[in-house]
């Protein structure tokens, strides 16, 4: 074998290695959900949610392959919440840490579950559990947990995990945003 063929072989091996590593990585994306909640005129400080999961894996295939993400799950969920609050008209600021804010409300919380599991070749189950707390001044005005579960039967495809996780988060936002909006309107 000449040097050029050896170099080509190493490049091919490297490319195959990179491709196989990427197969168990899910890129997290979020598009705004279709939520009709408007009129939030209050100022809100949203603190990035804490990741309380026991494992950093985001899912598992029916063959036992564990999936991870290419980015922070906490930031993915927190930024989705931020975008939806902003869309609803709230004056919302995003913060990585909690400290004294000069806003009407502060939203903090955590999530203990964000997972997709392929049960069979065509059946998927995704779950998410988010805990939120809203405070006004020093007083807690709402503590609520949201558990979202989604099942889907579909033909396996390369993007099914990514799409299903986005739909799961959109479903979570469809439950969370109306609760926050109503709570803020009520406690004004």
Image: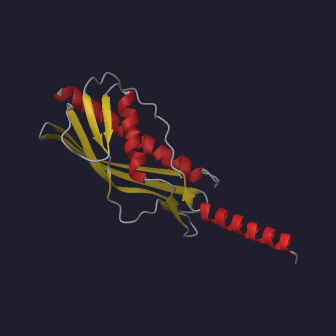
Q: Quadrant of the C terminus?
A: top left
Q: Position of residue 50 (x, y in %)?
A: 31, 53
Look at the image and tell me whether residue 150 can be seen. Answer: yes
Q: Nearer the viewer, residue 171 or 25?
A: 25
Specify the farthest residue to the front: 3
Q: Is residue 114 left or right of residue 41?
A: right
User: Toward which corner of the image does residue 95 lie, by quadrant?
Assistant: top left
Query: What residue is at 46 percent from the left and 50 percent from the top?
Result: 150
Query: What colouring method underlies this structural image?
Result: secondary structure
Q: Quadrant of the N terminus?
A: bottom right
Q: In the picture shown, does residue 22 fall above or below 30? A: below
Q: In the picture shown, does residue 144 fall above or below 186? A: below
Query: What residue is at 65 percent from the left and 64 percent from the top?
Result: 18
Specify the farthest residue to the right: 2
Q: Is residue 154 left or right of residue 41?
A: right
Look at the image and tell me whether residue 23 can be seen. Answer: no
Q: Position of residue 54 (x, y in %)?
A: 35, 65
Query: What residue is at 38 percent from the left and 51 percent from the top?
Result: 74
Query: What residue is at 29 percent from the left and 39 percent from the top?
Result: 46
Q: In the picture shown, does residue 20 fall above or below 32? A: below
Specify the farthest residue to the left: 138
Q: Position of residue 67 (x, y in %)?
A: 52, 62
Q: Position of residue 85 (x, y in %)?
A: 35, 32
């Amino acid at each position: 074998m000449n040097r050029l063929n050896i170099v080509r072989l190493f490049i091919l091996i490297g490319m195959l290695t990179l491709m196989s590593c990427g197969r168990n990585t899910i890129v997290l994306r979020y598009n705004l959900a279709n939520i009709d909640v408007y009129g939030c005129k209050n100022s809100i400080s949203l603190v990035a949610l804490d990741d309380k999961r026991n494992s950093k894996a985001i899912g598992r295939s029916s063959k036992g392959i564990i999936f991870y993400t290419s980015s922070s799950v906490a930031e993915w969920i927190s930024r989705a919440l931020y975008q939806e609050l902003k869309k609803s008209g709230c004056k919302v600021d995003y913060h990585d840490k909690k400290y004294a804010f000069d806003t009407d409300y502060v939203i903090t919380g955590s999530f203990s579950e964000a997972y997709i599991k392929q049960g069979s070749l065509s059946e998927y189950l995704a779950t998410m559990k988010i805990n939120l707390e809203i405070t006004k001044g020093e007083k807690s005005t709402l503590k609520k947990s949201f558990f979202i579960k989604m099942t889907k039967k579909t033909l396996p495809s390369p993007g099914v995990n990514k799409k299903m996780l986005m739909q799961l988060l959109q479903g979570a936002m469809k439950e969370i945003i109306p609760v926050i909006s109503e709570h803020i309107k009520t406690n004004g």
